[in-house]
Image (cartoon, rainbow, N blue to C red):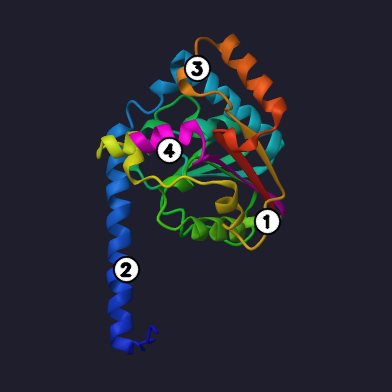
Amino acid sequence: MVQKCKLSNKQRSRFTTVSLRSSLCKVGVIMALFDQSADGYDSWCKTKSGSFVDDLEKNLMKEVAQPKMGEKALDLGCGTGIYSYWLNKQGLAVTGIDISSGMLNVAKSKHGAENIEFLQGYIEHLPFKDETFDLIISNIVLEFTENPKEVVKEAMRVLKRGGRLVIGFISKDSSWGKMYEEKGKKDANSVFASANFFGVEDINGLHQLQPYKMKFGLFFSMNEFADKNNAMEIEEERRQLKVNSNAGYIVARWDK
């Protein structure tokens, strides 16, 4: 039988301080890794396979998020601004927030940066009033956060009534999730070394509200990519089979 122990106020305070320091230490390590990779972060999207994956993910994100011209949008963990610019080109007023100064410097250096507000800050503690945004998106970001539930909670706080929170995930059970997990194990300096990937059950457990909808994509593995036409044939064929556990990418949407 396990005995329950009661912590004094002093012990509880010390425990909280140690936990906070541990959390901040991990955040600092992850931030440093992203700072180091900032300059080359966009380069993969310019390769044949990378541009195909980027387009596929954006198409799924658009289908689920349904961005509308004139809406006020927040890009959580905006990185180099890939999705911030994508939303802005569709006529949305966009704010991007990220903890990595290196990533933000790259984002701010791009053409059209004057149309987007980029902020440095913790996405677990957003510097915005309640019900500020019509649409909040975050693509492959929660994998690198210390407390993903807190991120979702904060996002729902600053989301307007009737707004949409849309998050893209790498599926942990897919060939993509396993590939990135293996990269993290082999290279301690990889951004994937501290990543935690998600399955459908994990996503359902992020908030008391269940996602309004989920969409699945990336049904081909990286080593199957020969060219865009070949990859699309595989993608469409396997998507029709609806074996969602094989999908490498999941987009989930919560409505408020």
Pair 4/1: label in front: 1
Instruction: Please give left or right for residue 60 compared with residue 194 in the image.
Output: right
**Badge 4: few (under 14), some or many (20 or more) residues near its Cα, within 10 Å?**
many
Q: Which of marks 4 and 1 is nearer the N terminus?
A: 4
Q: Pinpoint residue 185: horizontal percent, then vertical percent.
A: 30, 39
Marks 3/4 in contact by CB < 8 Å: the verdict is no
Q: Which of marks 2 and 3 is nearer the N terminus?
A: 2
Tell me the element at label 2. helix
Pair 3/4: label in front: 3
Q: Report, in whole angstroms, how far the alpha carbon at label 2 lies from the one at label 1.
A: 29 Å
* Identity, as a three-letter code, of the amino acid under mark 1: Gln
* Identity, as a three-letter code, of the amino acid under mark 4: Gly
Q: Pinpoint residue 126: horizontal percent, then vertical percent.
A: 49, 57
Q: Report, in whole angstroms, how far the alpha carbon at label 3 lies from the one at label 4.
A: 28 Å
Q: Give the range drawn in magenta.
A: 162-182
Q: In this figure, which residue is indicated by the disc labeled 2?
A: 19
Q: Residue 115, which numbered label?
A: none
Instruction: Please give left or right for residue 228 compared with residue 78 in the image.
Output: right
Quarter containing the N terminus:
bottom left
Instruction: Please give left or right for residue 64 compared with residue 78 in the image.
Output: right
Q: Residue 224, which numbered label?
A: 3
Pair 1/3: label in front: 3
Of 129 and 182, nearer the camera is: 182
